[in-house]
Image: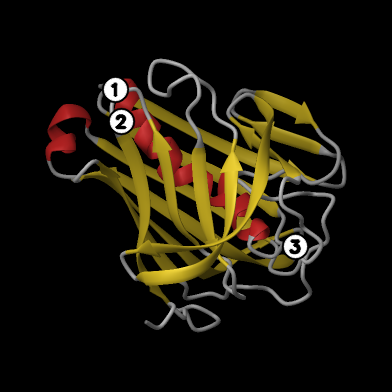
Amino acid sequence: MKKFISALLIILCNTAGAWAQEQVAKTKEVAFKAGEQITYKLRYGFLSAAETVIKVEDSPLKFEGRPVLHINAQAKTLGTFNFLFNVRNEYHSYIDPATLLPYYYWENRKEAKYRHTDKVTFDRQKNIITADKGQFSFKGDVFDFLSCYYYARNIDITGLKVGDVLTLRYFLEDGIHPLTITYLGKEQTKCNLGTFNCLKFSPTIIPGRIFKKNSKLYLWITDDKNRIPVKANVEIVVGSLTMDLTQASGLKYPLNPVKK
C-alpha cells in the first residue's frame, strides 16, 4: 500500500512539469503571475485519494540581489487513504521571474512514519548544485520539479510535431535525472472544470510493482496561453489512476472551456 500511495503522489506532484525541452525557446510573455492558485485531485477508480494545491506568490526574499517568485505545493492524502498511509508533503521553489530558473528549493515530506527534508541551492555562475547529500556539477538548464512545471508552461511549441520526443533534466535528492516525453498531438479532454482543447503528451514511466510492463502515462495540457495541465491518466497493475484539475484562480489569462 505504501508503494501505491507513493505512486499516486508522484503522478500528482511530478507529471505537471514533465514536458519541457531545453532546446526549445521560451516564449517572451510569461504564462502566469503571482496570485495564481491551482488544485489537483487524484482518483483511484471512483475514490479520491490525494490532493495538491500549488500557489505562486511574491516573495520578500532576494537571491543574488534579484527578486524572486515563490512557488509552493502542498500534497496530502484524502479520506480512507489517510488511514492507510497518511501523507503531508510540502515543496517550495524560488525562481527568477524573468528566466524562470530556480535559485533555491526545499521540501519537507511526511509519509506515514517516513520523514525527509532537502534544501537545494542552484549556483548558475559556478554550475554547482548544493543539496543535503552533497554537491553536483551541471551544464545547461536544470530544474527542481516545481520550477520545471512553471518553466514548461512557457515553452515555445510552435514547431512541435506529433511523435517528437522531448527531454527535461531535473534535480532530485541525489542527482540530475532525465525524463523523456512524446508529443501525441491535439485532443479535447474533460476535467472537473469542463472540456478543454489540449496538447497531449506521454511521459515515460518505469515498470514495476505498481505499473504494468506496457503502461502508458498520458498528460493533457490546455492549448492556450495558460498551458495548465488539466488531466493525467495511467493504468496500474489493478485499475487506473487519474489526476484532474479541480480549481484554478488568479490566472493571468481566462481559462476557457469548450462551449457545447
Query: Residue 2: x, y in percent?
Result: 29, 22
Q: Amino acid at mark 3?
A: Ile
- Label 1 with label 2: CB-CB less than 8 Å: yes
What's the coloring here?
secondary structure
Residue positioned most to the top: 209
Residue positioned most to the front: 260
- Label 2: which residue? 5
Q: In which quadrant of the rendered view does residue 89 lie?
A: top left
Q: Viewer-proximal residue, 48 or 121?
A: 48
Residue 85 lies left or right of residue 225; in this view the side is left
Q: Viewer-proximal residue, 134 or 220?
A: 220
Query: Residue 195: x, y in percent?
Result: 40, 70
- Label 1 with label 3: CB-CB less than 8 Å: no
Q: How many residues crowd around disc 2 within 10 Å: few (fewer than 14), some, or many (20 or more)? A: many
Q: How many residues crowd around disc 1 within 10 Å: few (fewer than 14), some, or many (20 or more)? A: few
| Residue found at x 56% / y 38% | 119
Tell me how far mark 3 sits from mark 2, CA to CA.
33 Å
Point out which mark residue 85 bears.
Answer: none
Q: Amino acid at mark 2?
A: Ile
Q: Quadrant of the C terminus?
A: bottom left
Q: Viewer-proximal residue, 247 or 35?
A: 247
Q: Is residue 193 above or below residue 179?
A: below
Q: Earlier in the sequence, mark 1 or mark 3?
A: 1
Query: Residue 228: x, y in percent?
Result: 52, 64
Point out which mark residue 157 bears.
Answer: 3
Q: Element under label 1?
A: helix
- Discs 3/2, front: 3
- Label 1: which residue? 2
